[in-house]
Amino acid sequence: MTRLNRDQLVQLAKSQITEWTPQQLDGRRKAKEAITVVDIRERDEWMQGHIPQSVFIPRGFLELQIEQHQPDRDAPVVIYCAGGVRSALAARNLQEMGYTNVISLIGGFNGWKNASLGFKVPKVLNEEQRIRYSRHTMLQEIGDEGQIKLIESKVLLIGAGGLGSPAALYLAAAGVGQIGIVDYDTVDVSNLQRQILHGQSDVGRYKVDSAADTLAEINPGVKVIGYKEPITSANAFEIMRGYDLVLNGSDNFPTRYLVNDACQMLGIPLVDASIFMFEGQVTVYQPKHLEAGIEGGPCYRCLYPDPPPPGEVPSCAEAGVLGVLPGIVGSIQAIEAIKLLVGFGEPLIGRLLLIDTTDMTFRTLKVNRNAECPVCGDHPTVTELIDYNQFCGLPSSTHAVERAVEKVNVNGHHAAEKVLV
Ligand code: ZN
């Protein structure tokens, strides 16, 4: 048997395989040729940068894993390493496995970089993040990739009150990178029964300032942006644009309509909720985005096309609420937000969750999109934001909501009955 030294072995391998220059690979990809590109370097080399749309299979696993990525043995497979030597030898091994169209990249990743072709540096969790979010990353549905999505996401909370408090706490703890909070109110002693973002020493402070301090204590990596102004038709787009998701914790109808309409117009998913005494409701309004393959679901106006006329609403009355109730409902909103941001599970799109804490029942009602909806329907009539006059009305009771859902589902094309919400 002939003994070959290292250089002779490489020479022999190179004589038996095809080699491409980085420019050749780039040209073929630009011509839309389907080519599997495999990086066979070590993990730390891959993490420092790699050719875009390449798959990572360390050299030791190449023969074991290549079939998962390219089962067709006649399809072109380009292998690269750092300098083009390891890949030449590896290409020869793949040929022996029956791969007929294996190419080694001349000069490897260094050659690619030297040719000034673009490369990708993958985002990774740093050491602190790795520890902080370990209970998330252990979950297959989240993993490092999902956690990085959370870190890179931006969520806007409408209100830092009963619902906004638990939602903000958990979203910050979960590592959502930017949390915007719209609230111009200050902390009052009567808020402390349920608004757990704030404490005794915060009384009199702006809620957004108090919220920012509390959230920084839970997770200093989160950027909190406070908007100490009422959200109106004049500033809604400006505030909301750029956020990946809006979580509504407002307790008044003008804001509910405004936020719904703005989310529909901007294409931002809205996690909506309301509470009433011992009862709560949560749903997700996902605008349709056909180019992105998002079918979407109903919106708030599918259920309640217009606010009730001012004469038909009862006088302003403060309604009582069990303090822990928004803790449950706001936490469910936070879960729905995380599911949407990471992309797992079944969000409450087209479903309305009804919670009654007196007998502790959780029910979901299916809600259809209303083809006649003034915002998301087939012929929208509301095409710009509207500031409704501040009006009062009791928050939605479960019973009232059930009637509205039944109406929109049964009648399909007819608008929901104008019920008090
Ligand atoms: Zn709608």
Image (cartoon, rainbow, N blue to C red):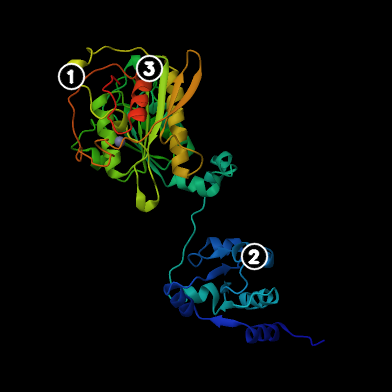
Of label 2 and label 3, which has the lower sequence position? 2
Identity, as a three-letter code, of the amino acid under mark 3? His
The three-letter code of the residue at mark 1 reads Pro
Mark 3, secondary structure of its residue:
helix
The spot of residue 281 in percent (x, y) is 40, 24
Marks 1 and 3: which is nearer the front?
3
Work out whether residue 309 can be spotted. Answer: yes
Q: Position of residue 13 (x, y in %)?
A: 66, 83
Q: Nearer the viewer, residue 136 or 399?
A: 399
In the displayed structure image, the side of residue 36 where residue 377 appears, left or right: left
- Observer-nearest residue: 116 or 256? 256
Ligand 1 quarter of the rendering = top left
Judge whether residue 126 can be spotted in this image: no
Q: Residue at x 50, y 81 (%)?
A: 21
Name the residue located 44 percent from the left edge and 72 percent from the top edge: 32
The spot of residue 39 in percent (x, y) is 57, 67
Label 1 sits on residue: 310
Q: Work out which quarter of the rendered image holds the C terminus and state it.
A: top left
- Quick one: SS at disc 1? helix
Query: Position of 102 compared to 341: left or right?
Result: right
Nearer to us in this view, 52 or 7: 52
Please, what is the three-letter code of the amino acid marked with disc 2? Glu
In the picture of the structure, the residue carrying the numbered disc 3 is: 399
Quadrant location of residue 217? top left
Vertical relation: 117 (above or below) 210 = below
Instruction: Choose top left, top right, bottom left or bottom right for residue 95.
Output: bottom right
Tell me which label, 2 or 1, sits earlier in the chain.
2
Ligand 1 closer than 8 Å to label 3 CB: no
CA–CA distance in space, label 2 to label 1: 67 Å
Residue 67 is marked as 2
Mark 2 and 3 residues: CB-CB less than 8 Å, in contact?
Answer: no
